[in-house]
Image (cartoon, rainbow, N blue to C red):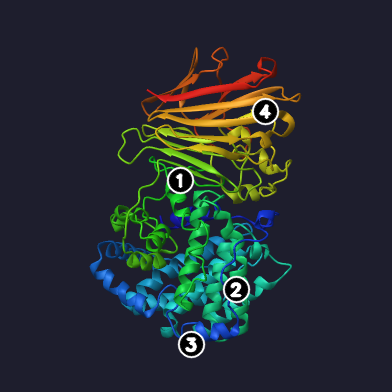
Amino acid sequence: MRLKIIYLFIVCCLAIVMPLSSIATDNPANDDPVKLENPMDVAYLKKKLRKGSPRLILTPSIEKQLKKDVKSDEVVKNMYEAIKLNAAEIQQQPLLERNVVGRRLLGTSREMLYRINILGIVYRIDQDQQVLNRINDEVTAVCNFSDWNPSHYLDVAEMSLAVALAIDWAGEDLPASTVELAKTALIEKGIKPSYNKEGNTGWVDGNNNWNQVCHGGMIAASVVVAEQEPELAAETIHRALEGMPHALEEYGPDGVYPEGSTYWRYGTSFSVLTASMLESAFGTDFGLADYPAFKESAEFRLLSMAPSGWYYNFADCGDRRSENGDMTLAWFAIKTGNGIYYERERFLRDPAEMGELSRWAGAGLVWLSQFDEEDSQPLPLAWKGDGSNPVVFFRTEKGNPHNYYFGGKGGRGSVNHGNMDAGSFIFEVNGVRWVVDPGNQGYHNLEKTGFNLWGRCQECERWTLLTKNNYGHSTITVNNALHHVDGFASITDFQDGEQPEATIDMSEVFGEEVASATRRFVKEGDQSLLIEDQIKASDATQHITWQLMTTADVDITEDGATLTQDGKQLKLDNLSHPELTVSIISLDPPPLELDRQIDGLKRLEIRIPAHLMSEDGETIRVRLSAE
């Protein structure tokens, strides 16, 4: 059973990693981001770096409070019980080996980070010699690997963070030979390969999650080896403070994480870990926590979680959130005082039911201990976030029996982890996700066939997949053609209120195939959504296809269709073109063998030929309403 869990864990890990070819992105908007404070040089390092351990996330005063809270705070005590269960399970497992899957050692690196977070925090609190012995064995094993796979630098970064935490949290009690081995490995296998200009170092000034993860790992390693290699450590931290804004800028202006909610968890968690480590080591995070729109991204994260437990899973996002509390959000609760980010009920689940915790659970326990609620601000019922992948949400308040949830988006296909999904949406009401996004699929299973998943040119192979192209999303397709990969769809209008609405200008997405195109979403009531498209044809326009993706059973009616799922129904009313019959295209099985298999997936279409379109522009109006 444990082997199965590890296998699934590694598979999931592989499903949320962006490889090298996607890092180098030419985005003029990122040429001059808001900078972090950066006084880092050797003199500053020697003067300001906290002397002695612990100094990564923990400090003596933070640890003292944590040990009190483990006994007195209901949430911290409960989560620590879950951590101890994880620690007991880890000690029953074999030591890690250098197991490269495809081109990644990442599953091993992540397992190491998980083990050290769990074992390390248990040792800090309980001073258990058996746990210390296991930490020693774990560190010795990975530090004797031939390398940490620098060709895929996420692997190095997560391993470096794991080893750095082990030495910072337990090094004073580990054998001197282990500490020396670990510090040598951090220098030779962790930091130095990051200066190989011919290697995988595009993340240094990259604008995606690699930047956040890799700089975080290098900072942790630098803090641990600072006394031995002050010049290298200062240079590496200085480089990180210069480079991190290129990724942090992507949160602007409103907090949307362009790569989707599960990548928010990945990239943001490492930025949070980095801020926490810098603060504990230097007494400042150099402005990271207060970077424009960074704190606001916690609201985006919560809004991305639907009442059903599904994410609004645009981009390369996973399908469902964990039942456990989100420890990264708990850090935002500390920084804002907003109790809405502190998922108390989830943290109080039965520890035996929590299963394997996150690989930063040890750090997360520290954040839980630091929370002091000042206020609890409710989430907005309608919200719009701009940026490189703009999104909009409509929802009902908690407790509303209809659990209305809508997510729609603009953006472009060429954004990091992006798809040709501009104008697409998902829709839930009455506990059913009626309109779906096909979501993500495992990377390794595609890559091992030679499939070029990461090219993002107009003709690139990525766009043959249903999860990536516009044929697999609830949007508009013109002339059966792919969306223009660099065409940007912006949210041009947003109105709050009892009937919130948002308009997306999709004209660039279609190029010369139409003269103009906009899509408007309106929440008409707690069970109704209106989709209105205004399209002006060009000489190149042949036909328009209106698309909706669903896994529900579908019956065609005179004026649209009726969807049935879980004993409930949703009506699709073709308000503007009732004379045109809705078509059902089965996508189970999908078109390609490599496509993601989704049971019952189908695409509903309303096809409008150009000769039926008005010269002044055509309006397509469709209402979705629960019954």
Mark 3 near mark 2, Cβ–Cβ under 8 Å? Answer: no
Which of label 2 and label 1 is nearer to you? 1
Amino acid type at image mark 2: Gly
Give me the disc on residue 304: 1
- What residue is pinned by disc 2? 190
Q: What's the CA distance linking mark 2 and mark 4?
A: 49 Å
Amino acid type at image mark 3: Ala
Give me the disc on residue 176: 3
Which of label 3 and label 2 is nearer to you? 2
Please report whichever mark, 2 or 4, sits nearer to the chain's N-terminal start.
2
- What residue is pinned by disc 4? 478
Q: How many marks?
A: 4
Amino acid type at image mark 1: Ser
Please report whichever mark, 2 or 1, sits nearer to the chain's N-terminal start.
2
Give me the disc on residue 218: none
* Residue 529, percent from left and from top: 45, 28
Task: State whether residue 627 appears in this view.
Answer: yes
Sort mark 3 into few (<14), some (14-19) or many (20+) by Cα contacts within 10 Å.
few
Sort mark 1 into few (<14), some (14-19) or many (20+) by Cα contacts within 10 Å.
many
Element type where label 2 sits in the image: helix
Quadrant where the C terminus is found in the figure:
top left
Nearer to us in this view, 502 or 213: 502
Q: In the current view of this chain or complex, which residue is farthest to the right?
A: 539
Element type where label 4 sits in the image: strand
* Residue 323, percent from left and from top: 37, 50
Q: What's the CA distance linking mark 3 and mark 4?
A: 67 Å
Please report whichever mark, 1 or 3, sits nearer to the chain's N-terminal start.
3
Q: What's the CA distance linking mark 2 and mark 1?
A: 34 Å
